[in-house]
Amino acid sequence: MSLNRAELVLYDYIRSHPDERQHFEHKVRAIVAGADEAAKAVARLDSELWRYFEERRTLVPALHGAVPSSGPQRTSMKNLAEFLIRLWIQPKPAKPPADAGAARP
């Protein structure tokens, strides 16, 4: 999985600030727990990450230069959302096949 420049800079920022990392770990877990399907969790987290990026980039010089400032174009945070979910969410164990316990003649 490759991250775009904005995603990479935001991930580095979150990773290097323990309070921000803890905040996002809790946020990722809450979003995934509240979503009825993975695609909805990714979409919601994508939106949350972009909103956070927009808020912080006016204050953090490293984030300011991550995307061109030529208008209100939104940069996708989908890859970062998927990465954080994989990183911080325990994978669910696979269910055994229904016929795995059945005796065969």
Image: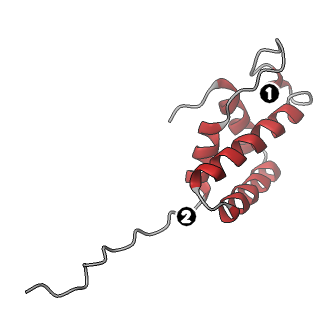
Q: Is residue 26 left or right of residue 2?
A: right
Q: Is residue 12 left or right of residue 89?
A: right
Colour basis:
secondary structure
Q: Quadrant of residue 105?
A: bottom left
- The residue most toward the top is 70
Position of residue 37 relative to residue 42, above or below, is below
Position of residue 98 relative to residue 12, above or below, is below
**Which residue is at 82% across, 52% downward?**
19
**Which residue is at 87% across, 30% downward?**
60
Query: Mark 2: which secondary structure?
Result: loop
Q: Earlier in the sequence, mark 1 or mark 2?
A: 1
Q: Residues within 10 Å of mark 2 (few under 14, many from 20)?
A: few
* Horizontal and vertical percent position of residue 70: 82, 11
Q: How many marks?
A: 2
Query: Mark 1: which secondary structure?
Result: helix
* Horizontal and vertical percent position of residue 32: 65, 59
- The residue most toward the right is 59
**Residue type marked 1:** Leu
**Which residue is at 58% across, 45% downward?**
83
Q: Is residue 29 left or right of residue 86?
A: right
The CA span between labels 1 and 2 is 29 Å
Numbered circle sitting on residue 63: 1
**Which residue is at 82% across, 38% downward?**
51
Position of residue 48 relative to residue 31, above or below, is above
